[in-house]
Amino acid sequence: MVYFVGLDVSVKTTSVCVVDDGGKVILEQKVSTDPADIIAILTSLGVSFGRIGIEAGPLSQWLVSALTVANLPVICAETRHMKALLTAQQISKTDRSDARGIAQMMRVGLFKPVHVKTLVAQEQRMLLDMVRGDLVCRRLMTAPGVGAVVALTYRATVDQPQRFVHSRAVGRACRPDAKALPVRRDRLRRRGVQMWRRPATHNALRSRTLTAYLQ
């Protein structure tokens, strides 16, 4: 038999209601709003759950992430749709009746799911907001090929440009274990001359033309 759960979340406490596939209430209890307490009371029943419903709100991201890690089939439902259904089927509005209504909605599938971003996505969003709010990062992103990650990495590495006397010292700060390679300027100069030297065929034609002119 599959069971369905409704969670009515408030700041301090959460009302938990568990019903079977026939709509019979199996458990009604109020626990503290903590993922560990909610997971403990659900796993103590030793049954399989079809859906666990929670209304979208300020604490839903935190609770949904924790219940998902615990391999519980939690679903975050849209607030306005759930509120309209709960108002239609209840005479008095209490935390207990709301949890029971959410559990029945999960049982019959009468809800609109809402995507809840993972903690990794939320952290990445915070980094993007940080980049957009930083003047130096926005200026760096005006260069072609420089995005948010490169701009933020460069900003965090350089930190204060005044501590560098020369621009070539920035590379040593990025890689402190890197050794300075000697630069042979004479070798580079010879290579540059060889690159711009005229081909042999051009020189041969030029010499023949000059010889014919002199004759």
Image (cartoon, helix red, strand yellow):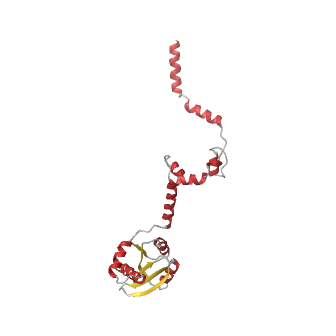
The residue depicted at 46 percent of the width and 72 percent of the height is: 60
Taking the spot 49% from the left edge, 58% from the top edge, the residue there is 129
181 horizontally vs 98: left or right: right
Q: Left or right? Give the position of 80 relative to 122.
A: left
For this view, does 176 lie left or right of residue 200? right
Q: Is residue 17 above or below residue 113?
A: below
Rendered image quadrant of residue 47: bottom left
Count of labels in the image:
0
Question: In this orientation, does residue 1 appear?
Answer: no
Residue 68's place in the image compared with 46, above or below, is above
Residue 195: give x, y in percent of width and height: 56, 33
Q: Is residue 164 above or below residue 10?
A: above
Closer to the camera in the image, 67 or 186:
67
Report which quarter residue 196 is drawn in: top right
Location of residue 124 in the rendering, given as x and y in whole percent from the top left corner: 50, 61
The quadrant of the picture occupied by the N terminus is bottom left
Q: Which sits in the foreground, 2 or 127?
A: 127
Instruction: Measuring from the top left, give residue 11's x and y in whole percent.
Output: 49, 76
- Pinpoint residue 4: horizontal percent, then vertical percent: 40, 81
Q: Residue furthest left?
A: 88
Is residue 205 visible to the viewer in this orientation of the structure? yes
Q: Is residue 123 left or right of residue 20?
A: right
Q: Relative to 116, does residue 137 appear above or below in the rendering?
A: above
Which residue does the image show at 43% across and 87% down from the upper left? 27
Which residue is at the far front? 92
